[in-house]
Amino acid sequence: MLQKTIMDIYAGHKEMLALLRELVLIQSGSYNKKGLDRMARTMAGVLEETGLETRVISFEHCGDMVLARTSRAGHEPGLLLVGHMDTVFPADTSFDFYREDGDRVLGPGVLDMKGGLVVGVFALKALARAGILDDLPVTVFCNSEEEIGSLYSRKIIESLCRENRLAFVLEGGGLNSEVVVGRKGKIGLELDVQGRGGHAGNLSAEGKSSAILEAAHKIIQLEALNHPPDILVNVGLVRGGMGANCIPETALLEVDIRYKDPADETRITDRVRDICGYMTVPGTNAGFRQVSGRPPMPASLETERLYSLVEEAAQELELPLARETRGGVSDANFIAAAGLPVLDGLGPLGDCDHSEQEYILKESLPQRCALLALSMLKAFPGLKSQSV
């Protein structure tokens, strides 16, 4: 029965692409609540069709979210599937199309990560058709604000971790069939510099207390903290001043920091504090605040065991599989920090996410659906029919 179901997955390729098209054409940038609420309703309807008990969780300040469970979920430790419905593209983006081009599919979120949502849905459909899904304790959570830090959803995810014993996250896979066994941690900072404003034509002999000039020194000092590949620091956005004829009174730096070792978080924060405490330009001062963050997802023995399980499924399906550690973060970081074994990157294969060239390889959709379905089954060794 399972072998036929796996074959049906490949036969249902057009159905997968149809759902992917529907999801991609819903504009769901992280701040587009109307679009995200529509995504939540759509995903809730699709998941309900698989036989899951589904509900939409309403939010005022972000998009609604979706929680779905099999009848056995919550009654025994099970498997948590996590995906997100938001994209990095704002509501007014010109990247608002779905296009199939040869062996590729292009569109906002095809890789990050509406393609992963499709993989999750059709893996569940396959197990339901095989009469297996009702026997599995599976919980599905669809986040609406992963791209902006999961500020509202983090507590939900951590609560769901306490009910389960392992997790799969449906971010896109790598072009060489990679899944993700580790991720760096992230610190998002805003650094404020204060100076004294004035007319640029009235500069005194004592000099000027320019916030932008001090910010320039801070940028050099912050960038000097880079120690690749373990510590990556990027001053990505600079704001300040009113005009060329005004001595700038304020400046703002937005800083992204990625780190591998959990102990580095304190060391890096202490160094940033030291940088803010020393002024090169007289009459200026500076401070910083952390606006976002995710702990690292370190590679571990538990992750390797989970990878071996998926690798076994890949071998039975005669599909390639590889492992990688990524600098980017996801909800898998929170899951790992909660102590739950987690494997990420189980979505379709592709590249160029967070850009208008984002794409997936068309053939990888059914391949990853089959891989996820069989991996989910293998996560519960007490069940029958665990091989194709």
Image (cartoon, grey):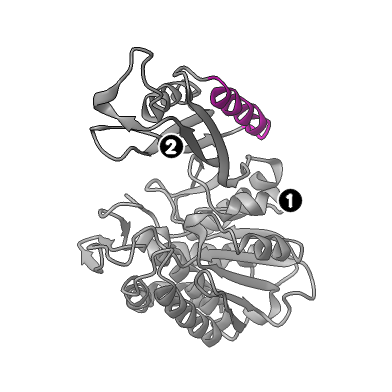
Q: Which residue is mark 2?
A: 253
Q: Toward which corner of the image does residue 198 lie, by quadrant?
A: top left
Q: Which residue is mark 1?
A: 339
Which mark is nearer the camera, 1 or 2? Answer: 2
Of 58 and 124, the residue lying toward us: 58
Mark 1 residue crowding within 10 angstroms, few (<14) / some (14–19) / many (20+): some
Decide if residue 84 is on the left or right side of residue 340. Answer: left
Q: Provide residue 84's location: percent of width, then percent of height.
A: 50, 64
Above or below, comparing residue 216 to residue 335 in the picture: above
* Image point (47%, 33%), residue name: 194
Is residue 185 in view?
A: no
Decide if residue 15 is on the left or right side of residue 181. Answer: left
Give the magenta part as a residue range: 261-278
The secondary structure that dominates the magenta segment is helix
* Image point (25%, 38%), residue name: 243
Q: Dot 2 lies on which element? A: strand
Residue extending farthest right: 75
> Residue 270 magenta-drawn?
yes
* Image point (56%, 79%), residue name: 1
**Separation (CA) of disc 1 from disc 2:** 34 Å
Residue flagged by tag 2: what amino acid is it? Leu
Residue extending farthest top: 205
Q: Dot 1 lies on which element? A: loop
First along the sequence among labels 1 and 2: 2
> Residue 95 magenta-drawn?
no
Q: Provide residue 125's location: percent of width, then percent of height.
A: 52, 79
Residue flagged by tag 1: what amino acid is it? Gly
